[in-house]
Amino acid sequence: MMLSPDLVGFVKEGLGRGLSRDEIEDILVRAGWPADQVRRALVGFADVESPIPVPRPVVSTRPREAFLYVVMFMALFVSAFNLGVVLFALVDLALPDPAGVPSEVIRAALRLSVSALVVASPVFACVTRIVRRGVEAQPSARTSRIRLQLTYVTLFVASCVLVGAVTVLLYSFLGGELTARFVLKALTVTAIAGGAFSYYLRDLREAERDPRDTRVPRRRDPLPAIGAATVAVAVVSGLVALGSPAGQRRERLDARRAQDLRVIARAVDRYEATHERLPATLDELQRGSDVQVAITDPVTRDPYGYETGEGTAYELCAVFELATTTDERELRRGRPFSRHEAGRHCFPLRAERDRLDPAASR
């Protein structure tokens, strides 16, 4: 907050007339001026021997400092957000929910957020160190306007997240929907937002304390070390959960094969509904389908296995690289393509018109 010109003028006049700083402060406080504003006005003039009051240099933000502060807080927001996503994904993988998001989607989000953390966290740490050195060299830089503005923005965002997390937690508790997954996620959000709020509130208080004490505080804050350790553990845990890049590629290829089989199965349903019989081969299905159907393996280019049975029964086969666990939602939909063994695996199916969209079955 800018000081009143009347206050600054009175302080300057008093110092010029030889009044001591304590006398000026006592007069202004008794007159009703806030003590912190009085001290800020006094510290605006250097305590040196001079026939006239000498103003201290005003802290100005240079383009380099503005750039560093913007990068620092941007990296902070990116790191905090992706740390939350990583921890959420680890909770989802450790405590799977049959009605929740598919595991492949969770792993994709985990992979993206781990990558963002690996990039953004070191950037935040390095820029913070550069800014810290600048403050140590020039303690008055702590009161830089852009630094204070971005700090207030961070406090506002963190406080909104905290209020929202507590509100949702209480709402779920009152509704009897409190689960271990939800509690862990709520605690994650609270810890991240609360840590940022606590750290920057302390930093703000240091910047707005008695202006005559411009020394950089020497007391070490444990929050940066705790935050760095949390990020490191989250990244390592995420990498362990994801597995090796080669394993990830094999999983994606198997997911592609499973998706191809889903498309083929839907195309068979449509074909049977239109022609009242099953296609004899996948080539016939591909020629008679109104949607694009991939009938070959994405790597080997060998055709997927397809055998017709009695009535509307048929079988689809593919060669998978990895074994997977059961996806209950896929089983409920009658498409158990997410459950297969490594190697050649066949799925016994039956063309069913009731699985088609109403518009597609007409």
Image: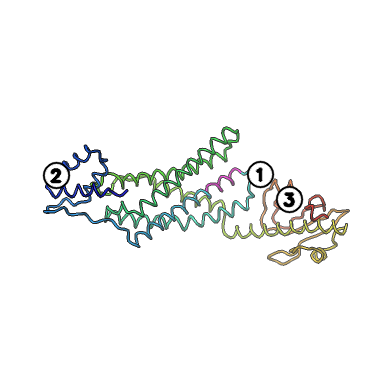
Question: Disc 1 marks which amino acid?
Answer: Ala
Q: CA distance from mark 2 to mark 3?
A: 86 Å
Asked if the residues shown at circle 2 and circle 3 are in contact, with their CB atoms under 8 angstroms apart, the answer is no
Inspect this view and state whether residue 253 appears.
yes
Q: What's drawn in magenta, residue-wise? A: 86-95
Question: Disc 2 marks which amino acid?
Answer: Ser
Depth check: 176 or 249 in front?
Answer: 176
Q: Is residue 228 magenta?
A: no
Residue occupied by mark 2: 20
Question: Disc 3 marks which amino acid?
Answer: Pro
Q: Is residue 90 magenta?
A: yes
Query: Residue 292 is drawn in which quadrant?
Result: bottom right
Asked if the residues shown at circle 3 and circle 1 are in contact, with their CB atoms under 8 angstroms apart, the answer is no
Could you tell me which secondary element the residue under label 3 belongs to?
Answer: loop
- Residue located farthest toward the front when viewing the structure as drawn: 6
- Total number of numbered labels? 3
Residue occupied by mark 3: 336
> Dot 1: few (<14), some (14–19), or many (≥20) neighbours within 10 Å?
few
Mark 2 vs mark 1: which is more N-terminal? Answer: 2
